[in-house]
Amino acid sequence: MSLGSPRLHLRSVGSTNDKARELAEQGAPHGTLVTASEQTAGRGRYGRVWVTPPGTAIAASIILRTFDGLLPLRAGLAVADLAGDAARVKWPNDVLLDGLKVAGILVEARAPEWAVVGIGVNVVSVPPEVADIATSLDRDDVDGALSELLRALDRRVAQPADELLAALRERDALLGRRVRWSGGEGVGAGIDASGALLVDTPSGTVALSSGEVHLLANVNGGR
Ligand code: BTN
């Protein structure tokens, strides 16, 4: 069943994720899409603020009624499909272009009833507040990019897990790269079948099932 219908588009909203969660609780069907030209209280992971200036970016939240634990990665890969061959997924679901963040994804769920996949993509330009760490698709058609994204998400959500993980391996921004997380440092060693990030450390391979990792300089010392 295709994602994006029914669609509620708002000129301005606090957060499309908040609106979608409300609709999900009220029984909105699988595939329901909430979009906004502007968000005034957009939310990122870990309670961060997500800025969506009017008309420059995709701010979209999609309600799913069937989903698996790989959903954040499926969404990340769909955004990478939109962003082109150079795009990389930084576990769990940031999407990078030239090492800069082009999109953010916030998945919120009350399993098994619903999940809301919130996707913010800088399409036209980057909010000035984050110009040093973010980039955009450098395209001028936000609605066209949204249609492409929904088609990619449809495909990625339906894709068998083994194929999805293989595709992710090709796009893994952390593979072979030195990373740091709250528990230590190591080298990214791929993503396992549960969606956990594998990290090789001097004391063995650890699997991180949630959290945040930071990229350090390359193993070979370069960038
Ligand atoms: C992150 O990188 O921390 C996640 C950012 C997620 C932003 C999107 S924009 C659409 C949806 N509505 C929100 O309030 N957040 C998500």
Image (cartoon, grey):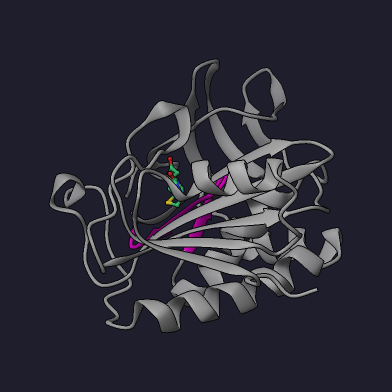
The residue under the point 52% across, 80% down is 147
Would residue 140 appear left or right of 15 to someone viewing this image? Answer: left
Please say if 120 is above or below 221: below
Q: Position of residue 162 (x, y in %)?
A: 85, 60
Q: Position of residue 164 (x, y in %)?
A: 76, 63
The residue under the point 62% across, 71% down is 4
Q: Position of residue 158 (x, y in %)?
A: 81, 68
The residue under the point 33% across, 39% down is 41
The extreme front residue here reads: 26
Would residue 99 appear left or right of 90 to someone viewing this image? Answer: left
Q: Which residues are magenta?
A: 88-100
Q: Is residue 105 magenta?
A: no
Would residue 201 appear left or right of 206 to someone viewing this image? Answer: left
Q: Is residue 89 magenta?
A: yes
Viewer-nearest residue: 134 or 61 = 61
Please say if 49 is above or below 184: below
Please say if 167 is above or below 190: below
